[in-house]
Amino acid sequence: MAGVLNFRPTPVLRLPSSSRKPNNKVSLRVAAELSETSLPSSSASVSTEERLNNISPTISPPPNFKPPQPKRFAVRPDKIFDILGASLALIFRLGTGVFVSGYSASFVSSDEIPPGQYALEIAGFKVKETSKLGPRPEKPIEIYEFESCPFCRKVREIVAVLDLDVLFYPCPRNGPNFRRRVAQIGGKQQFPYMVDPNTGVSMYESDDIIKYLVGKYGDGTIPLMLSLGLLTSFAMIGRMGKGTSYSPSKLPPKPLELWAYEGSPFCKVVREVLVELELPHLLRCCARGSPKRQILYRQAGHFQVPYLEDPNTGVKMFESAEIVEYLRATYALP
Ligand SMILES: N[C@@H](CCC(=O)N[C@@H](CS)C(=O)NCC(=O)O)C(=O)O
């Protein structure tokens, strides 16, 4: 995984064409033209060209930054409408994207779950959750998409159902980096676009992507809610176009890591901002029933999502409202 997150070696640069006058600002952009051969069919890194589109690579956390304490299921008072709006999607989608495939749950007494093991606790009982996963991909699937696109939502839901880790390249409207890359790799700007670096397969079309993913990493069955056409459009109503358009930002050297899952409204508001700021991020998907919940529990001493790990600053944090503020303070350009 670590290799995936690192940069590729600096790609071959072509010299700017001769007619252009050297001008520091312009030549930086021009000199960043990539040779065709350096464009990978599948890539997990941010190219030199993309970095040079945003010429301010100094990434540091806000002054005196201190991560907040986790407060499970608590909504910050100024975020009530945000979280309510984001919850509408969950209702319209009848919970698709909340549970991993083959999910089952049973209440057990607290002492049946050993200490140090994650389990949701309700009224003194613990919930034992299990799921049935298909073959696991070695490297994360790569997906180019944006939050408010209903076709992209369908794909994100199957990602949650199959418990896949995905390296997302956000493609908001007017985004300067990854929209262009999709056109270069796949031939057109259409989203979602998926690249599976494990098989070399890449494709457009949400239904085809879903079929491919369930065939390769599931049991071949497409959940009913994902085979009924574009019902996902309703899921977008509560968010009024959030996660659609680019907001100028610094492009980080390394993708951020977000522990989250599609069905959670708290995760949705964070994803919207990651998309608007065009920040590549590795989704550590952990819907209900995911074995990765135990990994986060062990790693962070607590399970709650969203949980952000930013390898560019060393910041690790819970709490959606504060994550959104952190992302804006760290990456947004004035
Ligand atoms: N105040 C937190 C609430 C986050 C939260 O409660 N997330 C739920 C998922 S929607 C969770 O992690 N629940 C713990 C569990 O499922 O065990 C925030 O805004 O981030």
Image: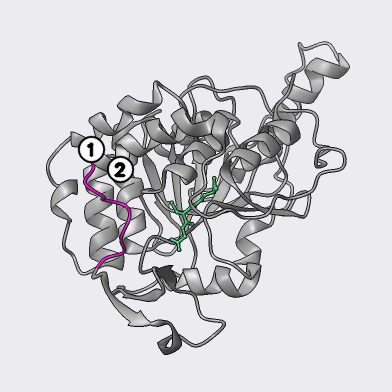
Secondary structure under tag 2 reads helix
Q: Are marks 2 and 1 in contact (CB under 8 Å)?
A: yes
- Residue 136 visible in the shown view: yes
Residue drawn at the location 67% of the way across and 53% of the way down: 317
Quadrant of residue 102 within the rendered picture = bottom left
Magenta residue check for 157: no
Q: Would residue 174 appear left or right of 95 to someone viewing this image? A: right
As drawn, 315 above or below 27: below
Question: Which class describes the residues within 10 Å of circle 1: few (<14), some (14-19), or many (20+)?
Answer: some
Instruction: Find residue 309 and report its horizontal and vertical position in percent.
Output: 66, 55
Span colored in magenta:
92-101
Amino acid under disc 2: Leu
Residue drawn at x 23%, y 38% is 92
- Residue corresponding to mark 2: 90
Residue type at mark 1: give it. Answer: Phe
Residue 97: in magenta span: yes
Mark 1 sits on what residue?
92
Image coords of residue 81 (percent x, y): 45, 28
The reply, left or right, for residue 102 in relation to residue 69 is: left
Q: Is residue 195 above or below residue 295?
A: above
Closer to us: 80 or 136: 80
Image quadrant where residue 286 sits: bottom left
Question: Where residue 204 sits in the image (x, y, percent)?
Answer: 31, 40
Position of 215 compared to 283: left or right? Answer: left
In the image, residue 223 sits, relative to residue 219, either above or below, namely above
